[in-house]
Amino acid sequence: MAGGPIRWSELLDQHNPWTTDPSESDPWQATGRSKPAGLLYAEHSCRRTLDEERRYYDRFEANHSADLDDVPAFLAHRLQACRDADDPRIALDDERSRRERWYSMIIPWMNLYHVLKRSSYGSLLPPSFESTADADELTNRNAFVGTIVVDDDADIRAVAREHGIPGRFVVREGDFSSSDVDCAPLPSEFGIDLPAPLLVGEYASGSRYPLLPWSDGLVCSCPYKHDRPWRVLCKHELLAAVVAGGEESIFLPITQGLGVPHRARRFVSPAIASRHTPRIESESRQ
């Protein structure tokens, strides 16, 4: 969000993470383009997280009964699995190597770089786009719609009459683009009781996905985000971050449809927003 809008000139024409290797030159350097500020923040965040996690491994090695309460939830789950393994030391070494690979290579190279392509995030930008699209321009072409999501057996007209709302803002969960791909979760699969007021992204690329309240923010339900555990960002969440940053708010705007609760619009945890300041090491600017 702090990185601001992204210029067309900052997006990659080509980047195939499956056929290229991080040992090769940085694709932005290779094309002579500037990296988006948000990407610089994200890469530094990966390095910082990797450094911060090392203390948990060290403590785990020193004391196998160490309390995991203050360890981030996903890592705590993985460390508990190491503790329960036949050979905890080997399991811990494997887990440490796996996560170092995630933060140093997979998340930046295979996720963030891949999203920052003209064929990915660029597909959500206005036509004949040449410079920087601000939040208003982005929401002219992409909508955040307040809806009531119902199960597939619901009578849309009856729900609309009951709540006194236009029927076009009542949507069966099976009608979302998520329903076409097994790995893309529907709201009910996230434990959300239907009917539920949710914010739905309707995108210039033709897709429609609900943004699902999870933890202290929202997560996109598109298959790209959920097909691999190391994908921490999709193009729809990147657009939401740019729009929210332009609004200077942790809440996404409703550009069409019904008013929905703040819980369904809160893109970032208030606790994170209150203490987060982007930090970049000097070498990442070079």
Image (spheres, helix red, strand yellow):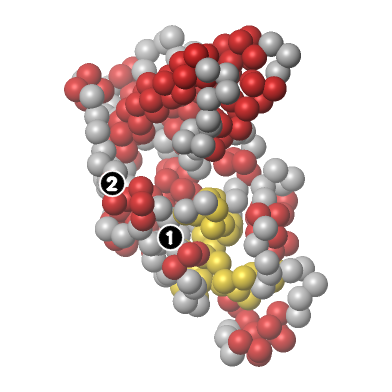
181 to the left or right of 109: right
The answer to whether one can see residue 229 in this image is yes
Quadrant in the picture for the C terminus: top left
Q: What amino acid type is highlighted by mark number 2? A: Arg
The answer to whether one can see residue 117 in this image is no
Q: Residue at x 68, y 66 (%)?
A: 193
Front position in the image: 96 or 119 = 96
Mark 1 Cα-neighbour bin, 10 Å: few <14, some 14–19, many ≥20: many
199 to the left or right of 135: right
Observer-side mark, 1 or 2, equals: 2
- State the image quarter where residue 8 is shown: top left
Q: Residue at x 25, y 41 (%)?
A: 277
Q: Residue at x 42, y 21 (%)?
A: 55
Where is 77 relative to 282, above or below? below
Disc 1 and disc 2 in contact, CB within 8 angstroms: no
Where is 217 relative to 197, above or below? above
Q: Residue at x 72, y 86 (%)?
A: 158
User: How many numbered markers are drawn?
Assistant: 2
The secondary element bearing badge 2 is classed as helix
The residue that mark 1 highlights is: 266
Front position in the image: 150 or 140 = 150
Front position in the image: 52 or 102 = 52
- State the image quarter where residue 182 is shown: top right
Front position in the image: 58 or 281 = 58
The residue that mark 2 highlights is: 275
- State the image quarter where residue 174 is shown: bottom right
Mark 2 Cα-neighbour bin, 10 Å: few <14, some 14–19, many ≥20: few
> Residue 59, how many percent across, how many down?
47, 19
The secondary element bearing badge 1 is classed as loop
> Residue 135, how many percent across, how many down?
32, 58
The first of marks 1 and 2 along the sequence is 1
